[in-house]
Image: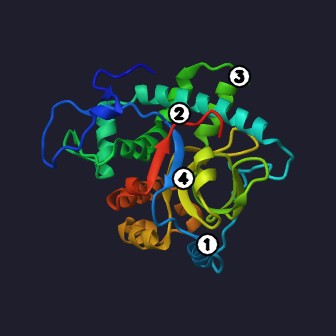
Amino acid sequence: MGSNDDAVTFLSEGQVTRRAAGCEKKTVERVNSSFSESSDRTRQNVPGAADAAALRRDVEPPMVLALHKDNALANDIDAPKHRAQVLARYRQLREISKQHHHKILDGISGDAFLHQARRLGLARGRTLILDDPDELNYVNDLIIHTAPAGRSRAIDRYAGSAHLVAGSDEALVLEAMRVALFAILAVERRHEAAGLVATDLFRRNQVWLVDVGLERCLPEGAMIATRVYTPERFSMTAGVNVPFDLELIEDLYAELPRQLRQREFTTLIDDRRFAETIYRVALADGIMDRVAYQELPQNP
């Protein structure tokens, strides 16, 4: 995929500043997202075990929550592993995913990017309105992994032109990214080797999630909304997450399109508008006051 003539200009983070609402600018500027490690910390109001337990009560029977037969988050949680080996493999796969991520974004037009930014409340007209450059990571997530009905996803178009070697790690990671699932995860415990063991609250299965930042900062019972893919025995985040709590659920329900409110959770979680609404509500609530992104440390 080549860059489009109207593609958004990439700048360093320090060059993007908040602009006043209503200002017009003919060219749009976008941060070159570093696809950095997931949140180094949630800065305040980390949802805890009580919220997770309450959410479980909300989503448990009488509504039946069946597992997906083709579950893309299936993990070999109990297999014996060593931390150094797990993290070395994680770093290798994360670097490959970053490369795919940047190449996919190279093929996104400025108009497409702006359209998604406006839907998240991050742009007016052709002007980005940002409190924090990292807010654009939520635009990137949706524009890569989702598309309106009848339209192809950017990640699928990229896969069709990438010409990767079959069986290579690059092909392995890309195929895992293509079947990534949006999920609400509740942290159960630290994994014995590395990362976290969490429960996907909508699909009712366990996920072994390797993420150095989240492992450091999330306590047991904490909940996050994130997109997850599984290129190995463990899963990884696709790059962004939202601290999830009961207050957010109330705001989310009010913002969901009416036709989605009647959907069963097992189908609602896979609707692109569900993730979009969560991101929009969280951004309006000042999500970047609670989440910070960092580059992956070499020796966590």
Mark toward the viewer: 1 or 2: 1
Q: Where is mark 4, residue-wise?
A: 226
**Percent x, y of residue 86:** 75, 39
Q: CA distance from mark 1 to mark 2?
A: 37 Å
Q: Amino acid at mark 2?
A: Asp
Is there a contact, CB below 8 Å, between mark 2 and mark 4?
no
Q: Where is mark 1, residue-wise?
A: 49
Q: Earlier in the sequence, mark 3 or mark 2?
A: 2
Mark toward the viewer: 3 or 4: 4
In the image, residue 265 above or below residue 38? below
Q: How is the image coloured?
A: rainbow
Q: Residue at x 45, y 63 (%)?
A: 44
Q: Amino acid at mark 1?
A: Ala
* Number of numbered discs overlaid on the protein picture: 4
Are there few (<14), some (14-19), or many (20+) residues within 10 Å of tag 3?
A: few
**Percent x, y of residue 165:** 68, 19
Are there few (<14), some (14-19), or many (20+) residues within 10 Å of tag 2?
A: some
Q: Earlier in the sequence, mark 4 or mark 1?
A: 1
Q: Where is mark 3, residue-wise?
A: 166
SS for tag 2? Answer: helix
